[in-house]
Amino acid sequence: MSASVTRGGEAARSRTDEHTWSQLIQSKTFARYDSSSRTGSLASLALELLDEQRKSWPQLAAGYASLTSVRTRELRCDGFPVWLQFNPGRIVSTGAKVDAQSIRGRRCFLCAEHLPPQQKGILYNDEFLVLCNPVPIFTDHFTVSHVRHLPQSFEAYAGTMLGMARAFRSRFTLFYNGPKCGASAPDHMHFQACPRGTIPVERAAQEEARRQHRRNVRGVDVFTLARFGRQAIVFESAQSAVLEQVLLALVTALRSVTGSAEEPMLNILCGFNEGDWRVIVFPRSKHRPDVYFKVGGEQVLISPAAVDIGGLIVTPLEKDFNSVDALLMESIFKEVSLESAMVDRAIESLA
Ligand SMILES: [Zn+2]
C-alpha cells in the first residue's frame, strides 16, 4: 500500500468519523440557539428542555423528585450566613475521585457518545450543549458541556461565559469550577447554570455595607466583600470585551502571586442583568479541606466548589448535615480560600 493511499484512507475515515460525530450531536439536539441572532431567550429554551426531559428521561424525573425531600439549615457564621443542604444524591459529585489516574481510567460522562440515550440538550453556537443535570441542587439545574472533549479552562472560555450569561438573560447564573477545585470532569470543559439569586453570595455582593470598592480598571469596577469569611472578588461592567480582558488579567495576576504554572484555583459565578455583568471570583488555595480526608467518624464530606464557597453547602451525608456548625464552616472557608495578602497583591497588579 502506498503512502498516498494510506493518507487518503485516513482522511476518508476521519471524514466519516466527523460525519458520524455531527450526526450524533444532531441526534442529541433538542433545539439550537445562536447568540449572534440575539432573538429569544436561552433561558426559555432551557426551561422547555427541562419540561420535556422530566417526561422522557426517568433518571432526571427521579433526581427532581428527590430534590423535593432535601433539607436546608441556616448557620450564622461570624459576619455572614451560610445554608447547609442535605442532598444524598450529590454523593456522586462530592465523593468523586478527581485525581489524574481516576479521571484517565473512567469513561467521560460529559462526552456526547456517553450521555444516556434519553438525554438531549440545547446546542449553543454549535459549540456547547445545555443539558439538564440529573442530580440537581436547584429547582432548575443545567450543565453546559462543550461538544468536544477539551480540558476545563476559564482562560479559553471567559468570553464564552460572558456571552452565554447574556443569552440566559437575568433568569440564570452561570458558574465555573476550576479543574483542580470542584470540577468533577476536569478533562471536559463545562459550566453549570442555576436560577439567578439562589447562591447566597449573589445577594451578599449587592449589600452596600459589605461592598468595598477597590479599583476601577479600564472602566471595570472591582470590589471585595467585607466580613465574609473567605476571599471573593466582584467585577462589574457593561462592556463584555474589556471585562473579559480584566478577568484574564486577574488569572495572570493570580498565577503570578501563587507561583502556579497551571490555571490558578478558582470558582467563578457570572450573571447578567439589565445590561450589566457581575462576575464573582473565589480564588482558592486548596480544593478539599483536611476534614474531608479524615477516617471514620471524624470525616466530614464537604467538597467546596462554586455553590458551596458561594454559601450553599451541599452535605450528602445526614450526619454531616446535623453536626456541621458555624465554627467548622468558618475554618473550612479559611482553609480553602487564598490568603488575603495574595488576593490584595493580585488586585493591585491589575492593569
Ligand atoms: Zn468528555
Image (cartoon, helix red, strand yellow):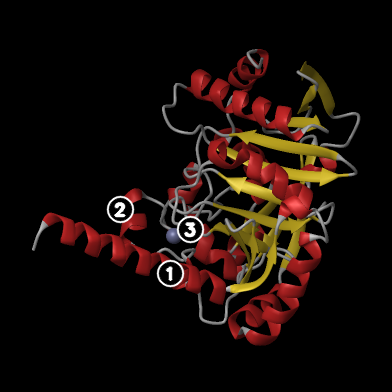
Dot 2 lies on which element?
Answer: helix
Instruction: State the quadrant of the N terminus.
Output: bottom left
Q: Amino acid at mark 2?
A: Gln
Say which residue label 3 marks. 297
Q: Amino acid at mark 3?
A: Gly
Mark found first going from the N terminus, 2 or 1? 1
Q: Position of residue 189 (x, y in %)?
A: 51, 51
Q: Nearer the viewer, mark 3 or mark 1?
A: 1
Reply above or below: 17 against 196. Answer: below
Q: Quadrant of ligand 1?
A: bottom left
Say which residue label 2 marks. 101
Q: Position of residue 176 (x, y in %)?
A: 61, 47
Dot 3 lies on which element?
Answer: helix
Between 76 and 225, the one lying in front of the other is 225
In three-dimensional space, the C-alpha distance between marks 3 and 1, rounded to whole angstroms, equals 53 Å
In three-dimensional space, the C-alpha distance between marks 2 and 1, rounded to whole angstroms, equals 31 Å
Say which residue label 1 marks. 19
